[in-house]
Image (cartoon, rainbow, N blue to C red):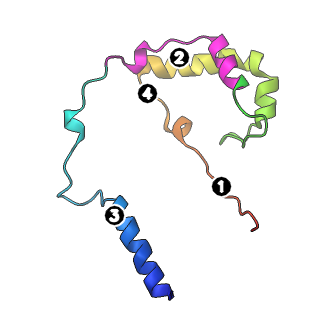
Amino acid sequence: TDPKTMADILQHQYSSVFTDPTNPRIQDTTSNLPQPTCRIEDIEFSTDDIMKAIDEIDTYSSTSHECIPACILKACKEPLSSPIHMLWEQSFSKGVIPQSLKEQFITPIYKKE
């Protein structure tokens, strides 16, 4: 198959599963959703919960945007759990999670065939 035909097939598939968010004809489907029964301010957790969450991180996972390796985070989980808890508790009590804590960096890794 020639490259134009392949590109057309890909374009057709892409168009069939994605929509243009700037299209004024797209209806707002969020207005029918029920109101949440809890708020972010109602979420409670402890320093033990923080340590359990750190334990669930794969030792070889990539670093966060602060460049803290997972193995260091896991090794220092006890002294770090209290400051991490205070930061998240303050964010939740205000009902705001800083944008920097919602960001991820995804790096594709080429694999040889």
Q: Nearer the viewer, mark 4 or mark 1?
A: 1
Q: Position of residue 101 (x, y in %)?
A: 55, 35
Q: Which residue is mark 3?
A: 16
SS class, disc 2? helix
SS class, disc 4? loop
Along the polypeptide, which appears first: circle 3 or circle 2? 3
**What secondary structure is the stretch in magenta mostly built from?**
helix
Along the polypeptide, which appears first: circle 4 or circle 1? 4
Along the polypeptide, which appears first: circle 4 or circle 2? 2
Instruction: Give how far apart the Cα atoms at labels 3 and 1 are.
Output: 27 Å
Using residue 112 as the reference point, say whether residue 85 is left or right of it: left
Q: Is residue 1 above or below residue 104?
A: below
Which quarter shows the C terminus?
A: bottom right
Could you tell me if the residues under marks 3 and 1 are in contact, i.e. CB atoms within 8 Å? no
Q: Amino acid at mark 4?
A: Val
- Residue 52 versus residue 9: which sits nearer the camera? 9
For residue 48: magenta? yes
Instruction: Classify 10 Å Cα crowding around label 2: few (below 14), some (14-19), many (20 and above).
Output: some
Q: Which residue is mark 2?
A: 89
Q: Position of residue 109 (x, y in %)?
A: 70, 59
Image point (36%, 72%), residue name: 12
Residues rendered magenta in the picture: 37-54
SS class, disc 3? helix
Instruction: Classify 10 Å Cα crowding around label 3: few (below 14), some (14-19), many (20 and above).
Output: few
Q: Which residue is mark 1?
A: 107
SS class, disc 1? loop
Q: Nearer the viewer, mark 3 or mark 4?
A: 3
Q: Toward which corner of the image does residue 10 lie, by quadrant? A: bottom left
Image point (55%, 21%), residue name: 88
Q: Which mark is residue 96?
A: 4
